Structure formats: structure tokens, C-alpha cells
Amino acid sequence: STAPGSFDQTSDIDRQSHQRHFNFPPGVNLGEFLIKVGNGKQEKIVAKGDVLLPNKVWFKPNKLVAACPEVLNGFKNDSINAVSTDENCLLNDKHMRIITRWRQLGGMDLDARLVTRGSLPDLKNLKKLNSFGLAYIPVPADELGRAYDLTNMKVINISGVKNVRQLLLNLGPRFNPKVFYLQNCQLNDDDLKLLSKNTALEEVSVRDNPKITDVGVRALLTCKRLKKIELPGTSVTPAVAEILAGFEYLTNAVVNTRIWNEEQRQMFDAKLPT
């Protein structure tokens, strides 16, 4: 018999199509959670009883997984290659011990505010990651960089994490993510000057870093490939529009113009390229 919370390959057809049955523990009902298969559309799955999942699934558990982390044991057959959670999942070290056993995991974007440094050694089990996210984990960024090699990550989300500057200094020119989420990281203009050495950068979010000004945004002009920048919660002025116009490939700039008066908004709009 199959142990509760484990996968069971029940037929040759399933084996040939690389599909697995997930048997949820008796009495457990997580309601609906989201999956995305390959490049297909996002689907809702009712997590009760026996669920058939294809290989290579992007898994988005809902908040009910917080109460029953052992349910995640059902995915240790490596069908999950990406996982993302928000703060409602209350992810903690118990969840992380399971997630870090998913050897095929290539993408991880987790709200980790309840995860401790005790989970860091298990990160070494994840050999295929190219997208790393442990937002709000209460561990300094440079310590994260020592626990896991971030040099080859294409996407990084360490929003809410402190000491980003030391991480950038430690990794140096080897570190070239394409997408970087740095919301609420206590950054200032000097940090953006360090980040400006990343020539591969295409998207960056520095929301909720009030010490960032137009000076820091101007430093990023060396990032020639930049396509998207998010600036709400910073101290940029309407004059930043003229700086943004200097990014050749920029197609998406998010700025909170509501904090300005009407005259300032008109000044900002006038400076934007048509």
C-alpha cells in the first residue's frame, strides 16, 4: 500500500507519460491550489484524495499548506520544477526541509520570513536552481551568498533582506542576474552604483527603498539591457523621467506619481519620451 502523502506510479501508462498520482493524507483537504504545466496556462487543482500531476509543474500552494507541511512530502518524486509561495503560506523550516529535497527544482520564489538560518545548509541539495528567491528571510544577504552559490542565478528575489551591498561586493563581476527583486532592502544610491556593474540586468525592482534618488537611477544607465524598473516607495523626483528616457530598451517603468502635485506630474509626463 502507498504511505499517506507519497506518490505512487500505478500503471505503465503513467510511467511512460512521466505522470504521478499524489495521495493526500487521510482527512487532509487543501482546497484548490495553483499549478502551471510547462508553458501552458495556470490551472486550479482540488487537493483532495488522489490527484494526477504531469512532470515539470510550477507549484503554488495556498495558505492551507501552512497547517499541514507534511503534505509537501507527496512531491518528493521530482515532478515539481518550480515553486512559489506568498506570506499566507507561513513557510518555515519544516517546509524547507521538504522543498530542498525536490532535486529537479529549477525555480524557487518563496516568502521566507519565518524561515531561519537553520535551513541554509539544506540549500546545497538544490543543484539545478537558476531562479532563487527567499524574500524576507531574517538572514543577511551576504550570509545567503555564502550558504548558496548565487553567481549563476538568472532571477533573484531577496526583497526584505539586509546587507545587500556586502553580497554585491563579495560576488563581484561574476554575479550577473537578469532579474533582481530588491524591495524594502534599505538600499541607497551607493548600492545602485554597485548594482550598475551588472551588464546583464534586464529587470529590477527597488520598491520601498526611500533612500534611493534620481542619482541612483542615473547610475543604472550603464545597464544597457534594462527593460523594466520599479521605483514606487523611493525618493525619485519628476526629473527622473529624463533619466528613464536614456534607457534604450526600457519598456516598463513603474513610478508612483500620486505622491506629487499636479504640476510635478505634468513635468514628469512632459519629460517622458513619446
Image (cartoon, rainbow, N blue to C red):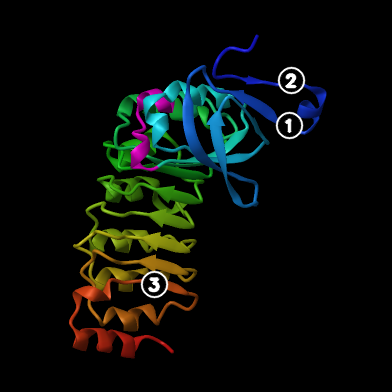
Q: Are marks 2 and 1 in contact (CB under 8 Å)?
A: no
Residue at x-position 64% and y-position 39%: 56
Circle 3 sits in a helix, a strand or a loop, which is it? Answer: strand
Residue 118 in the image: x percent, y percent? Answer: 33, 24
Q: Quadrant of residue 116?
A: top left
Q: Which residues are magenta?
A: 86-96
Residue located beneath label 2 in the image: 10
Residue 253, labelled with which disc?
A: 3
Residue at point 26%, 88% (across, down): 267
141 within the magenta span: no
The answer, for residue 197, to whether it is visible in the render is no
**Label 1 Cα neighbours within 10 Å, binned few <14 / some 14-19 / many ≥20:** some
Looking at marks 2 and 1 on the same chain, the residue that comes earlier in the sequence is marked by 2
- Image location (x, y in percent) of residue 96: 42, 28
Disc 1: which residue: 18
- The label nearer to you, 2 versus 1, is 2
Q: Nearer the viewer, mark 2 or mark 3?
A: 2
Task: Give amino acid for label 2.
Answer: Thr
